[in-house]
Image (spheres, coloured by chain):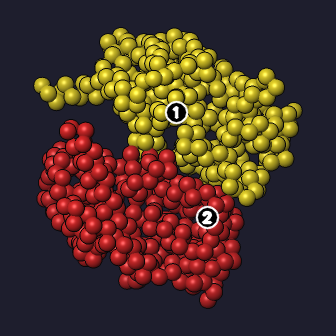
Chain colours: A yellow, B red
Amino acid sequence: MNATIIDGKSFAEQTLAQTRAEAQALSAAGWAPRLVSISVGDVAAAELYVRNQQKRAEAAGVGFEARNYPASISLEQLQGVLAGLNADPRINGIIIQRPLPAHIPVKALQKAVHPLKDVEGMHPASIGNIVYNDLELGPCTAVAAVEILKSLPLQMEGLNVCVIGHSEIVGKPIAFLMMGLGATVTVCHHMTRQVAVHSRAADAVFVAVGKPGLVHGDMLKPGAALIDIGINRVDGRTVGDADFDSCAEVAGWITPVPGGVGPVTVSILMKNAVRATRLQMEHYQAAFAAAV
Amino acid sequence: MNATIIDGKSFAEQTLAQTRAEAQALSAAGWAPRLVSISVGDVAAAELYVRNQQKRAEAAGVGFEARNYPASISLEQLQGVLAGLNADPRINGIIIQRPLPAHIPVKALQKAVHPLKDVEGMHPASIGNIVYNDLELGPCTAVAAVEILKSLPLQMEGLNVCVIGHSEIVGKPIAFLMMGLGATVTVCHHMTRQVAVHSRAADAVFVAVGKPGLVHGDMLKPGAALIDIGINRVDGRTVGDADFDSCAEVAGWITPVPGGVGPVTVSILMKNAVRATRLQMEHYQAAFAAAV
């Protein structure tokens, strides 16, 4: 094996430690960061995820409250709940847990979260700000993947990057974040004629499709960085979108699954929570100064 | 010369004719579309542009009012003007003319335009909606360039597209729009190592940089479509970013400058004005229905 395996857990610990220091400073100023997690209906699918977020929130010094609403709740009632949370200065971030019942469209809820409390970075305005290179709260998974790449000894300007997968919350934001750093970015997806043509030319490959074994070593340029964002269950094991063994032979760096992008994503959620709290504090202070 | 020259003027006329029919239907329903153009300070630089918009608005059956404010106006006063226009149901779209004086940051004004009146498609929420493939009002130039490509007999799904230039209002939105159509998109810019490597592999090339002669015929794949968005003044003539003669030898289709993307852009602005009016009508009707 040639590749250096990137330790996502240790990267996440560093991010959480920085975040904790910022959370303490905000708490001392009377603005203790606080998240509310909203899940609807049967929570079994999301429970592990929520519990993990709660643990990381504690590690980061961020308050965390998990709320569950019955599956019978209407979209309008949930929007009302969000309006209340938006207006409450003691709540600094709102997480919408998926899956949601079929009658609750996730986009309608994401749009109902105030952009300053959008710690998941899902509101259209948050996404638009990435395009404008004016990042405040970015989508956590995309930011996590890019932060991992940035930690490697590679020059981002002019880097040839291939993003496989063009979802709105992972692939596209990664593409725009990397463009903002000066990389030359190609985005591939299920309609791309030959993904390997693009991935083999890339210095760094991000893959976020949800297909185990999608990327093989022979699709990579020797020494390339491979950031694997896929999370798949195969025979009771969790694996990414890359065929780890063949890719690790060719790549220069590779993220494992589990233990790569996943832990970093949760640490970015906490970083967003602290940043959102600071933005809200500044927003209130400016409004108050204007009123005096 | 091998390339078919794309007639932007005739394309624009078709768009304006469709837009006019929709504008008449809205007028009959009591919602005559109406634009307000805001310029600040010396208008010489924008005057030709504004006059052209006014002419096209008339052709599309869209009301048009050009307002000019003195260079001494403050950002806060202008934001107040926009708040008034946002609240006025008789005004359906707001255009911010550039250049603005140095003390007026254009992004702050764009954010102050209500997303439903953002006919230029510049608000972060408008840009974010493109990423979400949920297009309501897109940036006019980017939409114009993509509409031209869509009119050619090419299959958009799987098309290899190279976008040269990664500005927030042209290059990046084109990339998103093309991804939404299923193309495989590479975005190049001034930090890209070898643009020709990417452009030569592309079935369609968009160029929006502002450098005359940037794209030569030897940078194209034979038969490719070349959409030239550049507008440059060279020796008193208006030219694009492509070296037209050498590109026309190699390309299958090419847009001229002037007479290519430019006229289509203004027709898309009018199409946005009509769409914005319809969205506002529906918004008011829904609010009224809820109040009854």
- The residue at 72%/24% (across/down) is A258
Pinpoint residue B271: horizontal percent, then vertical percent.
35, 66
- The residue at 45%/63% (across/down) is B143
Observer able to see residue A116: no
Report which residue position mark 1 lands on. A102
- The residue at 55%/78% (across/down) is B254
Spatial CA distance of label 2 from label 1 is 31 Å
Report the front residue among B50 and A78. Answer: A78
Observer able to see residue A206: yes
Q: Is residue B286 above or below residue A88?
A: below
Report the front residue among B146 and A278. Answer: B146
Q: Is residue A215 left or right of residue A126?
A: right
Report which residue position mark 2 lands on. B156
Mark 1: secondary structure: loop
Pinpoint residue B44: horizontal percent, then vertical percent.
22, 71
The amino acid on which the numbered mark 2 sits, given as a three-letter code, is Met
The amino acid on which the numbered mark 1 sits, given as a three-letter code, is Ala
Figure quadrant of residue A285? top left
